[in-house]
Amino acid sequence: MSQKAKEIFLKDYKKPDFSIKSVDLKFELFEEETIVSSCMEFVKEQECEALRLDAMELELLEIKLDGRVLKEGEYSVEEEALLIKSVPDTFRLEIQNRIYPQKNTELEGLYKSGGIFCTQCEPEGFRRITPYLDRPDVMSVFTTTVVAEKKSYPILLSNGNKMQCHDSFNERHGVTWHDPHPKPSYLFALVAGDLGCVSDSFTTMNGKEVALNIYVDKGNESKCAHAMRSLKEAMRWDEEKYGREYDLDIYNIVAVDSFNMGAMENKGLNIFNSAYVLADSDTATDANFMGIESVIAHEYFHNWTGNRITCRDWFQLTLKEGLTVFRDQCFSADMNSPAVQRIEDVKSLRERQFVEDASPTRHPIQPKSYISMNNFYTATVYEKGAEVIRMLHTLVGEKKWREAMDLYFETFDGQAVTTDDFLWAISEAGEIDLSQFRLWYDQSGTPHLKVEEHFEDGEYRLTLTQKIPPKLDGSEQKPMYYPLKMALFNENGALVHEEMLIIKDAKQTFTYTLDKMPVLSLNRDFSAPVIVEYSANNAFLMQYETNTFIQYEAAQNFAIETLEAMMQGKEVNATYIDAFEKLLDLESDLSYKALLLELPTISTLMQRQDVVDCPAIYSVKERLCKELATLYKEKLLALYKKHHNAKDTQLSAKSIGNRAIKNRALKMLSALKSKEIAKIALQQYTESLTMTDRMAALDVLEHTDIEMAKEAFADFYNRYKDNTLVMNKYFALLASSLQEDILERVKSLESNEVYDMKVPNLVRALIGSFSRNYKHFHAKDGSGYKYVADKILEIDKMNPQMASSLCLSFRMYDKMDSENKKMMKRELERVISTQSLSKNSFEIIRKILK
């Protein structure tokens, strides 16, 4: 491991020695190299020995201080820095350097994706472009000129408003952009290419017309309508809900295929992974459409929660990400079904963040140290961070929440701030003491809540005991403060009491005067991200509960109880079977009903085991699925036939609901592994016009009839092999299969003409999907571990960020049985002992093996 593996600590934060009032950049783009010229106006903020600029893999050409060329000896170059030894209190620094975007496979800084130059600077990519104070608390006004060959790169974009076009460069041309709002370097963006464009406009609440542009590869313009519609809805929603108006004359979005993240909120120029922009019914599923709507909104909302007010340092990342995820979740709930959105949000939290919280890689939403900041773009910072924000919203209520956010925007606009600044605004306007609540930012792990009930002489006592997991070093953590929504029902299903409890002590008892022992409903709406230890009356709640989240939760918990009892050798619970039939007969929103009929995931069941037993989990789930499909075959077929419409391509709530419920029924019927169901699936694949229906049919065929599956997959491949986004789905579906030859199939797909290990989406689709295929990843011969470890080593040389995300596949190390743990350890030690391993992968594996 190189010297670069230095740990950075929050406690060591110091204010920057210098500020930069303005920066003028010029990029001269060529096919083999790029020349970057910067002119920066510096002010010394405190006494210091030298100016230290962040710089990585840059070829310096010239440095001028107040117009004078510096000689060797007046500056020095370190591994990741440029030091200028003596500078005045105010000065102009001009630097010219050379970089090679075409060779940049890490996709950080300036790189080339296909024929497009683009950037990714968050968190520390700008230092790969030019020497700079590459930290979020240094905010400056940027002016950027981009020069390139006119024929190959007619579109030249950067942050802010377009100021001037230059056509006096022979066959080259240039465009100057100016962003009047001070910003840190991580929000810098540049794009150059030969792109198609879809344009529209939006009139803000104060009557300003904003030009909206979405730039894509030529030929994809027809797939931008949903993204544009989503953008305009997000702009309108932010005005109505938060009073936030867009502040530039233009808003540009660019979609590129090679991108490590989902999207990036660069000021006025959002760069997106094309998966979150391009969509039509032939190539995108309903889930893809929903995802695009959410991510488009998320990046737009960052304009105020992230750009206008940014982070003081990277330990404050959840300040912008947790808050903005909460905002995009609320937006999606308002645009679609609030009940379905809340369930999907919690499912995602449990599938990703709860796993993280129970692993050696767990950390608070505000980490205290890091080696590679790229490793902290996690479900904890994002999804758990959003749940922490949601609890604040629940505690103060909608009216005071808006007042608090107004105070936050008014007080800190144009500043780089901390989570404490945010909490001050909520506390001040919300009139609430948040000193104990602050622990949510500092403590790691998922809190548990033990529930005890007692009823005697008309008095019902509810005793709640907090069980806070220890820190990774084994030391104790303190009791948390959070809202807990609850309700009590009588034996006839009538609601007799409802309130929001405040949980703050290690042990609390709440007393109620009632005629009879009630039925308890706890953590309604999932008001707090905790694990409730309680054997609820799930059959009752499935039938009578009015809170949609708790009704879903009861259905899930009853299925979990049934499956866990089966793992202990018991028969299928007859009461559960009866309760499931009631769900089949339920009249409700169809998308919500499809969720109610869903059985717990393999990951959910794994999380509940002290020592993971994958074969047992897969076995009992398969048995329960087959039991339900056999008993309720006719009802499931009736559901399918009633709601199947092969020609319906609408994105209305009704059409989406129809597809959701009929595909849930078809998936359940696939447990029968019958020709009859396979033929229905093949017919659906052949006749349906939506990607949602085709993907559902392919999944069923893969697990019911191998020959029919081969036929359908071959047709799918021939139809879509030239569309990379659709091929992501193809690779993911094949890598997720439970068939016995999957590892060999995944290996063979690596040599497919479509697959390219340099494209993160394809790696996530193939290797990432296999690593989540628990049956084969945790194979008893260790082959799954060896394969993924080999891929980590291979990818780490090109794209460390992508490699480190694959390292997380091993984070259940502590919960595996002794044999699997031994095989995991062998592979992890092989990876971490590699001399040239990146600090990204090193940090993750070191935590897992500790």
Image (spheres, rainbow, N blue to C red):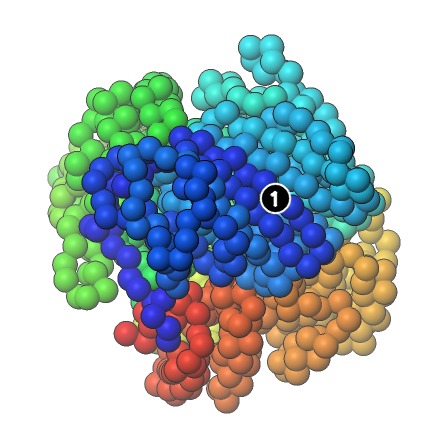
Q: Is residue 376 left or right of residue 518?
A: right
In the rendering, at what x and y percent does residue 529 appear? 34, 47
In the rendered image, which quarter is residue 468 located in?
bottom left
* Residue 76 visible in image: yes
Residue in the picture at 86% in, 54% down = 687
In the rendering, at what x and y percent does residue 441 appear? 27, 45
In the rendering, at what x and y percent does residue 789 appear? 50, 79
In the rendering, at what x and y percent does residue 493 appear? 39, 37
> Who is closer to the viewer here, 236 or 180?
180
Q: Residues within 10 Å of mark 1 (few under 14, many from 20)?
A: many
Residue in the picture at 72% in, 64% down = 730
| In the depicted structure, whether residue 530 falls above or below residue 713 | above
Question: To which residue does mark 1 refer?
Answer: 27
For the C terminus, the image quarter is bottom left
* Residue 288 visible in image: no
Which element carries disc 1, helix, strand or loop? strand
In the rendered image, which quarter is residue 704 located in?
bottom right
